[in-house]
Image: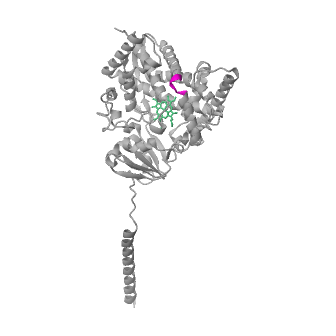
Amino acid sequence: MDDVVEGRTFNTGLVIVATLLIAKLICSFLIPKSTKRVPPVVKTWPFIGGMVRFLKGPIVMLREEYPKLGSVFTLKLFHKNVTFLIGPEVSAHFFKAPENELSQQEVYQFNVPTFGPSVVFDVDYSVRQEQFRFFTEALRVNKLKGYVEQMVTEAEDYFSKWGSSGEVDLKQELEHLIILTASRCLLGREVREKLLDDVSALFHELDNGMQPISVLFPYLPIPAHRRRDQARKKLAKIFADIIGSRKSSGNSENDMLQCFIDSKYKDGRATTDEEVTGLLIAALFAGQHTSSITSAWTGAHLLCNDKYLSAVLEEQKKLMEKHGDRIDHDVLAEMDVLYRCIKEALRLHPPLIMLLRSANSDFSVSTREGQEFDIPKGHIVATSPAFANRLGFIYKDPERYDPDRFSAGREEDKVAGAFSYISFGGGRHGCLGEPFAYLQIKAIWSHLLRNFEMELVSPFPETDWNAMVVGVKGKVMVRYKRRDLSVN
Ligand code: HEM
C-alpha cells in the first residue's frame, strides 16, 4: 500500500515539475525578457556595508570601485540606492536634466534649518528659480565692478597690518580676510562696519550646526542644532533692523543685501525680510569657505612651484607697466596666468567633493565605451568633482599641478567636452558665484604678489576630508617680507 502511495506521489511530483518547466519555456518565448540594464552594484556586507564604505571616505570608495565597475555604479546605503555617474559622458544628464527628472530639493533639504524658511530648498522649484534670478542679477558685471573696489580696499587694509617681515598661518589669514570681504560685498556696510563680531559669531554657530549627522537628521535635538536655530533667529532680527532702517531712510548701497531688498518676483511681489536674510545666508554658505579654501590652495601650490610663481609675478609686472598700481575689475580680468593657477588649484582641490540629485523618473546613460545603463526612479544620483577632475583620459598627468593645461593649444578641459571640469558644477545648476569668486581670489593674490616675498615654511598641506566643505588640513605657515614689485 505504502509503495503505491509513494509511486503516486512521485508521479504527481514529476507532472508538476514538467508542467512548470513547460510553462517557463512558453513564458520565455511569449513574454519579452526585461531589457533593463541596471548599473553594477558595489559589493559590501548587507545593510550597513554601504554606509561603512561611504564613511571610510567617498573618494576612497570611488578610487577603489571605478577601476572595477566603470563610470556608472550603485552603492546601497541602508534602504537607499546611490548611483554614481563619473565622467563627462555619463554626468551630462546629471547637469542638464530638468528638475522634474533630477531634483535638488530632497537631497539638499538638510540646508533648510540653516538658510531658514521660504528660501531655496524650502520653496517650490518655480520660486527657487526666481530667487536664483535674484542671485544672477546681484552678480552681474556692473555690480561686480563695485564689489571689486571693496575687495581691493579690504585686501589693502588687511595686509597693511602685517609687519615688514614675519611668519603667519596663511590659511587663517585668508579666512579672516574673506570674512571681511564677503561681509562688505554681500552682507553690507552696516554689518561690516558695526556688527562684524556679532554677525561672525552667529554665522559660526550656523556653521557648527551643519554636522555630518545633520545631513540625515537636520532637526535632531542636539546642542549644535539648538544653537544653530537660536543664531538663525538672531540673524533674522539683525537683518530685519538693517533692512527697516535702509527702507525708512531711503539709503541704497552697492551690495548683495541691497539687490535682494530691491528684487521683485514675477507677480510684482517684493521680497520679505525673512527671505532676504535667508538668501544672504545661502550666499555666504555658498561663497565664503569655498573661496577661502581655494585661495589657500592657490597659495600653497604657487609657493611650491617656482615656474608658476615666476609666471604670475611676470604677469603682475606687465600689468603694472600697463596700468600702474590700479587694480579694478578690468585689470583683474587681464590676469590670465593667475586665473589658470587658481583654476588648476581648484581642479585638484574642489571644496564641494560630491554633488547630489534625486531621480524623479527613470533615465538612461551611455558610457564612453558605448554601454547603456538604466537608472531607476527613486535612486539618489551623485557625481564627484574631486574624482572626475582627475580622470586620466581628460587630463594629462592628472595628479600634477600644471596650470598650462588650460592655456591656448592645450585646453584639456575643453578638448574633452562639456562637464570635464566640474569644480563649479555646470549646466542647469552651475555656480552663479564663479566670477565673484575668481575676482575675489585674484584681488587678494595680486595684492600679495605685488607687496610680499613669501616662502612656505610648513610642509605642503594635506586635505581635510572630514569637513563638509573640504579644505586644507592644519596650518599653512608662510614667512613673508615686504617688497615693491619692481616693474623693471
Ligand atoms: C571657489 C568658490 C566656489 C566654488 C568652488 C563653488 C562651487 C559650486 C558648485 C559645485 C555648485 C553646484 C552645486 C550643485 O550642482 O549641486 C555651486 C552652485 C552655486 N553657487 Fe557656488 N561656488 C563658489 C563660490 C560661490 C560664490 C562666491 C557664490 C555667491 C556669492 C556662489 C553661489 C552659488 C549659487 C547661488 C549656486 C546654486 C546655483 C543653482 O543651483 O542654480 N558660489 N557652486
Q: Is residue 168 visible?
A: no
- Residue farthest toward the bottom in the current orientation of the protein: 1
Q: Is residue 91 above or below residue 163?
A: below
The image position of residue 385, as x and y in percent, is 41, 37
Give the extent of the magenta segment.
138-142
**In this orientation, which residue lies closer to the viewer: 104 or 98?**
98
**471 or 18, nearer to the observer:** 18
Dividing the image into 4 quarters, which one contains the N terminus? bottom left
Between 11 and 163, the one nearer to me in the picture? 11
Which quadrant would residue 306 be assigned to in this image?
A: top left
Quadrant including the C terminus: top left
Decide if residue 361 is on the left or right side of residue 268: left
In the image: residue 68, left or right of residue 50: left
The x, y position of residue 18, in whole percent, is 36, 78
Is residue 5 positioned above or below 265 on the image?
below
Residue 364: % across, % down: 41, 50
Q: Position of residue 374 (x, y in %)?
A: 41, 53
